[in-house]
Image (cartoon, rainbow, N blue to C red):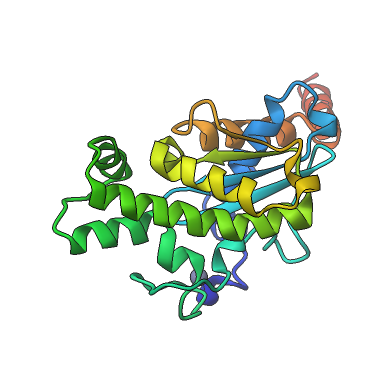
Amino acid sequence: MQTWSDAKVPDLFAAHTDVPVLVENDANLVAISEMSEAEDSHNDYFLAVLLGRRIGSGLVADGKLLRGFNGAAGEFSHTPVAGPSVISCVCSLESCLESVASGAAIAARLSELGYSVDIPSDIIALGRSGDPRVLSILREAGAQIGTVLASSVNFFNPRRVVLGGALSQSAPLAAAIRAELFQKCLPVAAQDLDVSAVADPDTAGARGALRLLLDEVLAPARIDELARVALEESAQSA
Ligand SMILES: [Zn+2]
């Protein structure tokens, strides 16, 4: 969000509490969760794609989260695409992927056709109903996401693409993304590529946040600091 681009978000919270404040992007939290639960996390190489109201992604290379120079790594959803946008987007591009194929855009398209869509599970339920008009919207959105994602996969060459967020549970959407990926990616990028959904999309972000917190609290420097404070307190009370 342009008006927030220079805001130091942790500082805004830190002014109201004495506890450490950590702030992280939602797609990065899904990536952290996925990384911490992988069998060989040190060599992990993947893209975690968050399919919710908006679209985001977290990049992990050699078991490390890549945030980019300004923290904007993985923002592939603001790539211009063909097709009319149905929602406005903070990036101000006329037709970015997010304004054309995100969960909010899918909901807007369905609402235009008279369907009642309040929460992501409404979209998933409508997809399961087999209604051809709904399936067409989901498949088209999945194809557009997959096309843009294919460029990222060609560029980044991950071992796996992990789909997270509520809409990762939409079979027609996920199948269209997968089909487009394997159709559009270079053979060398696609030959070992694994495309799967996170185990529990409802809690992946929270599990990532918990891991981030544990790593921060249990970091050697912080343990040393806690030990120093404890020693000082015991010396004072003695
Ligand atoms: Zn955008």
Please name the residue shown 85% across and 32% down the image: 43
Q: From the top left corner, tell me how far across and down residue 122 is, in percent.
A: 25, 42
Please name the residue shown 73% across and 66% down the image: 70
* Outermost left residue: 114
In the depicted view, which residue is nearer to us: 118 or 192?
A: 192
In the depicted view, which residue is nearer to us: 231 or 54?
A: 54
Please name the residue shown 70% across and 28% down the image: 36
Q: How many marks?
A: 0
- Does residue 52 appear left or right of residue 199 in this picture? left
Q: From the top left corner, tell me how far across and down residue 195 is, in percent.
A: 62, 36
Q: From the top left corner, tell me how far across and down residue 157 is, in percent.
A: 78, 48
Quadrant of the rendered structure where residue 60 is? top right
Please name the residue shown 27% across and 62% down the image: 108
In the depicted structure, whether residue 26 falls above or below residue 62: below
- Does residue 39 appear left or right of residue 17 in this picture? right
Q: Is residue 22 visible?
A: no
In the depicted structure, whether residue 60 falls above or below residue 98: above
- Does residue 122 appear left or right of residue 158 in this picture? left
Q: From the top left corner, tell me how far across and down residue 57 is, in percent.
A: 61, 51
In the depicted view, which residue is nearer to us: 39 or 109?
A: 109
Position of the C terminus by quadrant: top right
Q: Is residue 98 visible?
A: yes
